[in-house]
Image (cartoon, rainbow, N blue to C red):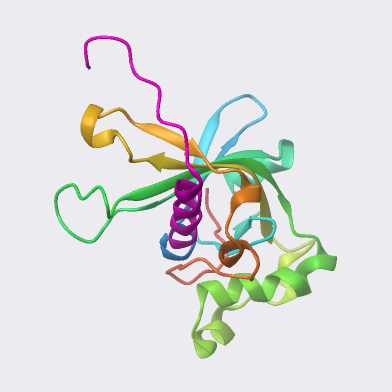
Amino acid sequence: MHDGAQQPPPQVTAAELTSMADRTGRLLDGARYLNLATVSPGGRPWVATLEYAWLGDPLRFLFGSAVGSRHSRDIASSPLVGGSLFLAGNGTGLDVAAVDGAQFTGTCSEVGAHDLDRYRPVFYEAVFPDERERARWMLPKSSLREPAEHRLYLVEVERWWLIDTRTWEQDRVDRRMELPLAELDARVVSTKSTGRCSGRGTPSRGD
């Protein structure tokens, strides 16, 4: 805690908007997992850690899950979601330049059978860059639609914030800067890109 009133963060400059777009690109490509927050019909919160792929223009996330998982049940009752991505750096100690993170809000829905040809390759190419591994683990379309237990889900991002590191070393106050999605650099949103993921990538069976 610090004495006196907390000072407001400085205004975001045009150069900082460009930097934020670059940081967003590094996060989307470099974060290993997506943390997705949902709420049950009874108002109980939940966070699931998920493998993901991302697409730009507009910014979206893809993930796979079982329809019986807790977050999938929450999404079925309410499409509103929030989430985060982060990079922790590679060394020990606190390296402000290496640590980064983003938070977002949006809506989430199942990918319908008519859209599987569009989104299924994107998800599995992200999770399995190796073609042989992808052939081994990629679920057929019939396993991603009724009455099968797995689905692909699409998150449509509505708002996006980044950690504000400009003044942290001076006052140790954690702040966030919102990056309007329209400001994302064309290099980030104009081409289809995928998140850097690990693991088998099969849609989760559990919560």
Query: Which residue appears farthest toward the top when viewing the image?
Result: 4
Picture coordinates of residue 18 (x, y %)?
Answer: 49, 54
Confirm whether the magenta stretch covers residue 20: yes
Query: Which residue appears farthest toward the front when viewing the image?
Result: 14
Picture coordinates of residue 131 (x, y %)?
Answer: 54, 88
Q: Which residue is at 58% across, 70% downward? A: 193
Viewer-nearest residue: 185 or 137: 185
Query: Which residue appears farthest toward the right when viewing the image?
Result: 114
Left or right: where does residue 104 sit relative to residue 42? left
Left or right: where does residue 59 sit relative to residue 86? right
Confirm whether the magenta stretch covers residue 45: no
| Residue 147 drawn above or below residue 37 | below
Q: Which residue is at 46% across, 68% downward? A: 196
Q: Quadrant of residue 173?
A: top left
Picture coordinates of residue 149 (x, y %)?
Answer: 68, 60
| Residue 85 drawn above or below residue 136 | above
Magenta part of the chain = 1-26
Viewer-nearest residue: 104 or 152: 104
